Amino acid sequence: MNQVMRAYAYSTEHILMVDIIPDSFVPKAMTEINVENLDFIQKLFWNILTADFMASIGTLAD
């Protein structure tokens, strides 16, 4: 990495590596986002199934 950095006129003096632990609200927010996405997908899938069924029995105008 140091060689690549030098190619762009940067140098690395010291590096401190630490574990990154997100705040407690991050997993909760990610879960909420996933639930919202799942709900959207379920509604979309239901609408597609319903439209296909209705079209198959001839209740929708083409």
Image (tube, rainbow, N blue to C red):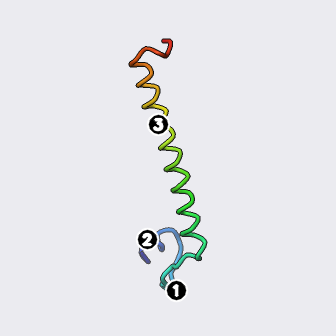
Measured as percent of width and height from the top left, residue 51 is found at: 46, 26
Q: Earlier in the sequence, mark 1 or mark 2?
A: 2
Q: Which residue is mark 2?
A: 4
- Cβ–Cβ under 8 Å for marks 3 and 1: no
Amino acid type shown at disc 2: Val
Q: Residue at x 57, y 68 (%)?
A: 28
Q: Quadrant of the N terminus?
A: bottom left
Secondary structure category for the residue under label 2: helix
Q: Residue at x 57, y 70 (%)?
A: 26
- Cβ–Cβ under 8 Å for marks 3 and 2: no
Tell me the mark number nearer the camera, choosing from 3 and 1: 3
Front one among 56 and 38: 56
Q: Which residue is mark 1?
A: 13
Farthest residue toward the top? 62
Measured as percent of width and height from the top left, residue 6 is found at: 47, 74
- Cβ–Cβ under 8 Å for marks 1 and 2: no
Q: Residues within 10 Å of mark 2 (few under 14, many from 20)?
A: few
Residue at mark 3 to residue at mark 1: CA–CA distance: 57 Å
Q: Earlier in the sequence, mark 3 or mark 1?
A: 1
Amino acid type shown at disc 3: Trp
Residue at mark 3 to residue at mark 2: CA–CA distance: 52 Å
- Residue 4 occupies quadrant: bottom left
Q: Say above or below: 23 vs 46.
A: below
In the picture, measured across the screen, residue 56 lies left or right of residue 11, that is left
Residue at mark 1 to residue at mark 2: CA–CA distance: 14 Å
Q: Say above or below: 28 vs 60.
A: below
